[in-house]
Image (cartoon, rainbow, N blue to C red):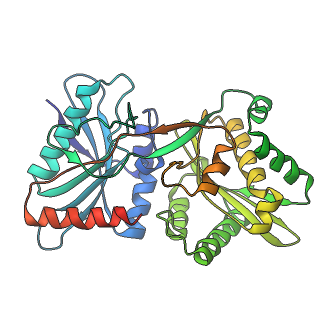
Amino acid sequence: MFRIDIQQDGASDWTDRIAGYPNLSLLQCGEYGDAKAAVDGWRVERGLIASDTGEPAPFQALIRNLPGLGGGLVWLNRAPLLAADADGPALDGVLGALRRHYVDGQGFYLRVAPALPSLDPASPAPAPTGFDPAGAAGWASAALDLAPDADALRASLRRNWRSHLNKSERADLAVASGAEGQPFDDFLAGFRRFIGDQGIATSVTPGLIGELQARLPAGRKLQAYVAERDGEPLAGVLIARYGPTAEYLAAYSSHPGRKLGAGQNLLWRAIVDAKAAGARRFDMGGMDPDQTPEGIFKFKDGVRPVPYRLMAEVEASNGGWLSRLVRWRVRRARAGN
């Protein structure tokens, strides 16, 4: 029998607790949850789904209560985290425990994006017992194995991408990097200006980035890379670190920067630095052939990462009108992303 034990870990302790789990993402790290709570008004709940056998499955849930009415939304994004040796029935067990705790016990609408690879993205598996398909495909991205040495990684770059990198290294670019001070401040200013000028809607807002950075400990702060020429901002890249993974979190570029290969220059530096710092994997932070804009997809694909897709999202509710209302609003919001 699976049971839920709600934990009172602080953000850093929680992140340390889950660091060794496969398929870990930034979204399950404690500092990210607290930043979302501070910026977007979520309530954060962290728990372990335990059984008599096997490792517990940790999860960080974002919760919105319906004021004065009870219930609301519980959202688990890329969770719960299962141990590497967990089998198929383990997923049914942990999801069943979540349903009993949040849906049957408290009347919430529960939505889960499981942190497990999709076995066949072209033919999604049936939803677990007690859940329905939520109408959203699983998270898709790609990751680069950092085990080869830097020369081998560079040799594996796509030819056109490597050509842009070579061009950028011959150009007179001023490049700076760091987690604090001018590089980070310059990235945040450039990113804010870029998404404002382009009218880009993103969940990774400048406000969330700033709040997250303030909460991360020194060894895991976001690393900013910025390039300019003659005082003109050209491009910026922001990298997150968690467990064995470095992740391409946010970026911006100008037309002159793209012509000069500034984005290739910064991303390559970030990859080399991540490897030198001990990261074993570099995640491209989202590469969906159906949703990622073509130019961004091709840019990320230039480093030849290996694509992956996680299981499709599932949902559970008690069928009441409040739960149906929350479900409708969530589906409408997700469709707009």
Q: Nearer the viewer, residue 194 or 214?
A: 194
Is 302 placed left or right of 128 in the picture?
Answer: right
Task: Count how many numbered circles sit on residues in the image.
Answer: 0
Residue at x 14%, y 54% (from the top left corner): 317
Q: Residue 112 at x, y = what percent?
A: 29, 48
Placement of 289 over or under 58, stated as above or below = below
Q: Quadrant of the N terminus?
A: top left
Q: Residue 130 at x, y = what percent?
A: 14, 42
Q: Nearer the viewer, residue 158 or 18?
A: 158
Placement of 152 over or under 245, stated as above or below = above
Give the residue furthest to the bottom.
197
Give the residue furthest to the front.
122
The answer to which quarter of the image holds residue 296 is bottom right
Q: Nearer the viewer, residue 270 or 46?
A: 270
Q: Quadrant of the C terminus?
A: bottom left
Residue at x 87%, y 60% (from the top left corner): 173
Residue at x 40%, y 40% (from the top left corner): 310
Q: Nearer the viewer, residue 34 or 227?
A: 227
Placement of 24 over or under 251, stated as above or below = above
Placement of 226 over or under 132, stated as above or below = below
The answer to which quarter of the image holds residue 186 is bottom right
Q: Residue 73 at x, y = what percent?
A: 23, 60
